[in-house]
Image: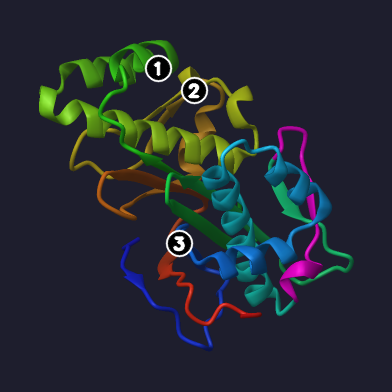
Amino acid sequence: MKQVWEMPPEDMELAEEEVHVWRAFLQVSQSTIEYFRSLLSEDELLKAGRFYFDRDRHRYIVGRGVLRALLGRYLHMLPDQLRFRYNAYGKPALDMPYSTLHTLYFNSAHSREVALFAFAYDREVGVDVEYMRPDIDFEAVAKHSFSANEYTVIKGLPENEKLAAFYHCWSRKEAYIKARGMGLSLDLRLFDVSLEPGKPAALLASREDPREVGRWTFETLAPAPAYAAALAVEGHNLKLAAWDWTETGVAGL
């Protein structure tokens, strides 16, 4: 799988063997924020209202708005007509009023001003993005939250490689548990991911179920400087398309 961020063609379609990842920057005009606010459901508006800072509220509104716009594009539906259901761990899925030949799976993540959205038919996907804060005590977090194998690898790296390795590990683990739809109810210490600089993203071991290793494809994503990101997708031999969402041409403006 190769990653190149591109502008999508007008006639873009998602093929069965493809995974689409979209990158969006969440700093947009006030008119775009208001348009996206008009697309949200009552529960989404309630959640938006619980954010204390306008900045965080706006990021949430834009993230949900872009997600609705992209889902509407794939499904040829109006974005405000989409309805979601949630599993016991909070992972969203489409609540479709009718049966379709294929089920569209999706996942989203954002950190600071960057958001990522992943889509595939008939296979689970998970995506994560993390702003690489330099002030975090990453060794303490890794010792507490990562597997013993991953912590040993981080400890053994040169000092100038440890921070990036920590965030690559974190984003890959988050992408995986999001694809599984279990959130942090799945102990991060139960599985190992690759994290050494220059090595491909991969699930290396699972003490929960060894068969998991052969079930997933991982991909490193590079959405912007100082961000680490990863994709986890069910299956193999898939084609990745990486698209850029832009504010230009937002409907309703």
Query: Which element carries disc 1, helix, strand or loop?
Result: loop
Check the picture and name the quadrant holding the N terminus.
Answer: bottom left
Residue 228 versus residue 247: which sits nearer the camera? 247
Amino acid on which disc 1 is placed: Ser
Q: Tell me where residue 58 appears, x and y as whole percent.
A: 57, 52
* Marks 3 and 2 close (CB-CB < 8 Å): no
Identify which residue, 74 or 194, lies in the foreground. 74
Looking at the image, residue 114 lies above or below residue 240? above
Badge 2 element? helix
**Residue 135, which numbered label?**
none
Left or right of residue 85: residue 66: left
> Which disc, if any, is residue 147?
1
Q: Nearer the viewer, residue 35 or 6?
A: 35
Q: Which residues are magenta?
A: 78-90
Residue at 68 percent of width and 72 percent of height: 72
Residue identified by numbered label 3: 24
Q: Which residue extends farthest bottom?
A: 11
Q: Which mark's residue is nearer the viewer, 3 or 2?
A: 3
- Upstream in the sequence, badge 1 or badge 3? 3
**Spot occupied by residue 71 in the image (x, y as percentages of width and height):** 65, 67
The CA distance from mark 2 to mark 1 is: 7 Å
Which residue does the image show at 30% across and 17% down from the upper left? 137
Which residue in the structure is indicated by mark 2? 188
Image quadrant in which you'd find residue 253: bottom right
Label pair 2/1, CB-CB below 8 angstroms: yes
Choose the circle earlier in sequence order: 3 or 2.
3
